[in-house]
Amino acid sequence: MFDIKWIRANAEAFDAAVSRRKGISVRASDLLAIDDKRRDIIVRLNEAQEKRNALSKQIGQAKAQKDEARAQELMAEVAGLKEFIPQGEADERAVELELRNALSVIPNLVFDDVPDGTDETGNVEYFGRNGSPETAAKVRAPKPVLSFAPKEHYEIGEAMGQMDFETAAKLSGSRFVVLKGQVARLERAIGQFMLDLHTTEHGYTEVQPPLLVRDEALFGTNQLPKFEEDLFFTPHGESRLALIPTAEVPLTNFVRESIVAEEELPLRLTALTPCFRSEAGSAGRDTRGMLRQHQFNKVEMVSITTPETSVDEHERMLACAETVLQRLGLHYRVMNLCTGDIGFGAKKTYDLEVWLPGQDTYREISSVSVCGDFQARRMDARYRPAGEKQAPRFVHTLNGSGTAVGRCLIAVMENYQQEDGSVAIPKALQPYMGGIKAIGGRR
RNA sequence: GGAGAGAUGGCAGAGUGGUUGAAUGCACCGCACUCGAAAUGCGGCAUGGGGGCAACUCCAUCGGGGGUUCGAAUCCCUCUCUCUCCGCCA
C-alpha cells in the first residue's frame, strides 16, 4: 500500500518503478487525479465545518446568557450548512475509498537489485553477499549420485503403502493426501526439527496462531483484495473466516493497528501450521504426488523490524532457511526472483529450490521476502523510535518459509531413497524418529 | 445459546449535550535547584488529514460504523472486542 503523498512527491520515480512490474498499467497521474478530487472536497468541507463550529460555539454562549433571540438568529444562520456538510462528508468518504481501492491493488516496488524478467526464467541464482558458486558449494550438500534410476516421491511412498492419494480422494477430492505409518512420522519429524532449529538457534519465538482469520488480516498481508480466489472461506455468522494460506497472515498481523516500542524489535516469530490454498489458477499443474496440495504443513518465519535493519534481516532469514536444508544434507540453489516472478507485496524475494532426483529438477521449498513498509501501511503497524520522544514510524515486515514441510518430505524421500525402495533418515532427523536410520524397503 | 457490565491519550483513570482534544496521577522529555543524584518546582508531551513560503491555522478522531442535534466522549442504532453469571460442550 502506497502513501499518496510519497507518490505526489515522487511521481516520476513511481512511474519508472511501477512500470517494472508485470501487467501493471497504473500511473501516478491516475492516482493524483483522485487525490486532487479528494483535496478539493476536503477544503470545501473544512470551511463549512469551521463555520458551523464557530457558530455553534456562539449559540452555546448565547444560551448560557439566556439570550434566546440571539441563539435563534444564529441557528437560522447555520441552517444553510445542514445540507452541505453531510453531503461533503459522504463525498469525502467515497473519494477516500476510491483512493484506497486504487492504491490497494498496486504491487510493491522492487529493489534495484531485483532482476528484470517476464517469468521464472528471468530469476538469477544467488550465492549470498560476497558469495560465489565456490563459497556456496562449501556449505551446501552436492547433488546426490544415485547408482539406480531414482523414483519420484509418490512412487516410493505408494510402494511403502504409506502415502495414499486414493483414500484422500475419497475423503476430500484431488490435491489431498493421506500419510500413514513411518511416512506420517517422518513428516512430523521434519516439522519438529525445523521448529526446534528456529526456536533454539535462530532466536524465533514459537507461536500457535489461529488458522482461521478475518478479512482485515488478509488485507494486511496482501491476500485481499486481489487474490481472494486463492483462499478457502468458511461462513461465520453473518460474515466469514478464511483458512490461512500461510502462517504469514496471523504472524505478521500480530502487530496490526499497534505501536510497538523499538526495544521490542526485531520481533521474530515462527509457527508450524497447516496451510490451505484453493490452487484455483493452477488446474492441471503438478497433479501427481503431493507437490501442490490444498492442505500442507509449513514452518513460517516472520520478522518485524525497523526500516534500517530490514535488508540485513532478509539475508539473515535466508540463512535461517538455508540452515534447514544444510542440516538435512539436501542439495539446493537460491534464486533472486525477477520482476516477472516476484510476489505482490515483496520488495525482494529469495526462493530456495531443492533438488529432486525423481523429478530431475529443482523445486521451490522456501520463499523469503522483504516487504518494506508495504504491509505495515495496510495494517497500520508502527513502532515508536527509542530515545527522545519521536513520532511513530511504520515497521518493516519480512516473511519466509523455513521451510515447507510437505515439500521437504518429498525432498528427503527422493534424495535419500535406496535401491531397495527404502528411505534413509538424515542424521538430523534420527532423534525425531526414535533413532531409526531408514524406513520402508524390503520387509 | 440466555442475562448483564464495559471499551477514553504510552499506562491508570475522571468526565453524561455547549469555549473538553479531553481533569488528575504515573511514565517520558526539557529547565531550575544540587558537587552529583533523589526529592521538589516550572514547562512540555496524542494521531491522522487540509491550507500557508513561513509564523501559524483549520478539520477529524474518546473501540469501528451509522444516526439525532445549531452543537456529541456524553443521547439513539449497529458492529467488533473484553469481562461476569447461567446453560450447553471438546
Image: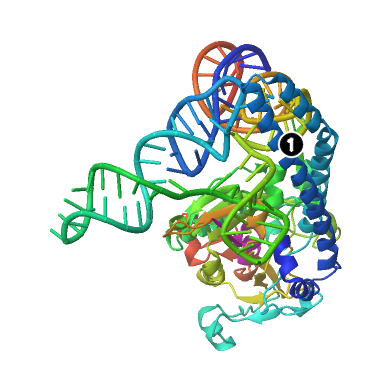
Relative depth, front residue between A42 and A360: A42
Rendered residue at 60%/65% (across/down): A412
**Is residue A120 visible from the viewing direction of this image?**
yes
Residue A443 belongs to the span the image colors magenta: no
Q: Is residue B66 left or right of residue A386?
A: right
Camera-side residue: B85 or A179?
A: B85
Q: Secondary structure at mark 1?
A: helix
Q: Which residues are magenta?
A: A392-412
Residue A394 in the magenta stretch? The answer is: yes
List x then y, in percent, for residue A249. Answer: 65, 51
| Residue A387 percent location from the top left of the image | 41, 60
A224 in relation to A309, above or below: above
Residues A271 and A215: in front is A215
Neighbour class for label 1 at 10 Å: few (<14), some, many (≥20)?
Answer: many
Residue A155 in picture, x, y percent from top left: 72, 62
Q: Which residue is mark 1?
A: A52
Q: Is residue A27 in sight in this rendering? A: no
Quadrant in which the C terminus of chain A is drawn: bottom right
Instruction: Identify the image quadrant of the N terminus of chain A.
Output: bottom right
Q: Eyeballing the image, is A284 above or below B61?
A: below
